[in-house]
Image: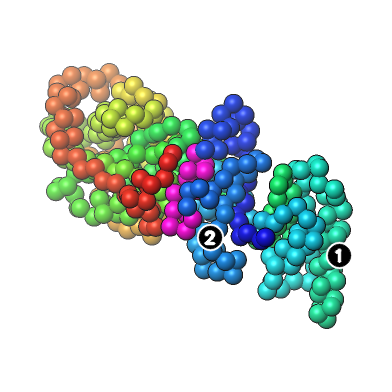
Amino acid sequence: MKTPVVICHYHEVALKQKNRRVFEKKLRTNIAFALSDLVGQRMVMRGYGRLKIVLPFGFDEREKFEIAKSRLSNVFGIVNFGIGLSVGLDIEDICKASLKVIEGKSFYTFRVKTKRQNKNFPLNSTEVNKQVGAFIIEHFKNNGVDVKVDLKNPDLTVYIEIVDKEAYVYADRFKGPGGLPVGSSGKVVALISAGFDSPIASLLMMKRGAKVVFVHFHSYPYTSYDSIEQVREIVKILSKYQLHSKLYIIPIAEAQRIIVLNAPVGLRTILYRRLMVRIAEKVAQIEGAEALVTGESLGQVASQTLRNIRVINQVATLPILRPLIGIDKVEIIQKAKEIGTYEISSQPYDDCCSFLTGRHPETWANLDEILEIERKLDWDNLIQMSFSGAQVEDIYADFLTKEATEKIED
């Protein structure tokens, strides 16, 4: 019996031997979420150092295969995946399945690549390659088509994996995003704007297995409402990688007005950032997060100097992770284009950090001076004032609903 399947492979997950089952379980759950409208959770199975997804639709239903391919390409933890057939441990069935998976493909040269995990199978990998290869050549020869084996640079590769009770056969193999399954490394709170940097910083944390909670600060009505809508769009795009996101939208305009009355123009940006860190830590406490994330890159703008970063860090009790610290703008913009946030981030928006700050922010802030200014301010009140106006939104990937997530067990 030929069963349509997707076979997902992972490298880095497998290296973490002590927590291997935890990582595999999280990856299985994330795949079940990603394919929730295509397959049932029970159809995503662990075993033999890979994940098998049993597809409930025919091998010829290409549209559904394309949807599955697109979504799996965004599931962190998957290194590569193959779409093909599962058959019994019979070399004749394996040969027939090989013909099925290459049906309709245009090629002149090919190779067969077998991995035999089941050492009780009577043929070794080389023998399987030879028999399947000969079967394919004979089939095409009988139909008046000449195909040849090329082991180094073939037009097409037939992959065969022989495991305990079945064999997987596929010719369509695709690259996954790698990394670790989202949620396997804990939770972080990311300070996100409508710019290029913070969305990419958030994405990189997802790739390292962190579940990201987003916080967006705004100065409406003193700045435009557009940045809020742009951030919603960006978080929607990022949600295809972690499927469900929580977004805190927090107004800080009134707190900024009080800071403005007590601080010189050049230091206001630093004081705003320290305010944001304090508020973000309150969000982290609510969400059970272990760190904050920002999109800062060393020296990229005047305020992102080592001294200023040190002064901002001083107020934090949680680690502040900066995934972009050594990455230049060209790389960041290229990544934004790849994931689809570039067009949104290219649009003009009002940054709350520039609210009444002047053209020349301090690049080498003095911590003692900052602390002296802050002693004049009631920070508990500023934080509470801002937090009382917070909106909290749940944002899902386009194909996922809250109801669907509740049906899947983590």
**Residue range of the region highlighted in magenta in the rendering:** 26-39
Residue 145 at what x, y percent from top left?
81, 78
Mark 2 residue element: loop
**Left or right side of 204 for 259:** left
Residue under the point 63% across and 41% down: 47
30 is within the stretch colored magenta? yes
Residue 101 at what x, y percent from top left?
69, 65
Q: Quadrant of the C terminus?
A: top left
Please tell me whether residue 326 is drawn above or below residue 64 in the rendered image: above
In front of the other: 379 or 17: 17
Going from the N terminus, do you reach mark 2 or mark 1 first?
A: 2
Mark 1 residue element: helix
Q: Which one is closest to the eye, mark 2 or mark 1? A: 2
Confirm or deny contact between disc 2 and disc 1 (CB under 8 A): no
Residue under the point 60% across and 56% down: 5
Q: Quadrant of the N terminus?
A: bottom right
Please tell me whether residue 153 is drawn above or below residue 373 in the rendered image: below
Res 134 label:
1
Residue under the point 38% across and 47% down: 407
77 is within the stretch colored magenta? no
Residue 131 at what x, y percent from top left?
86, 60
In front of the other: 102 or 356: 102
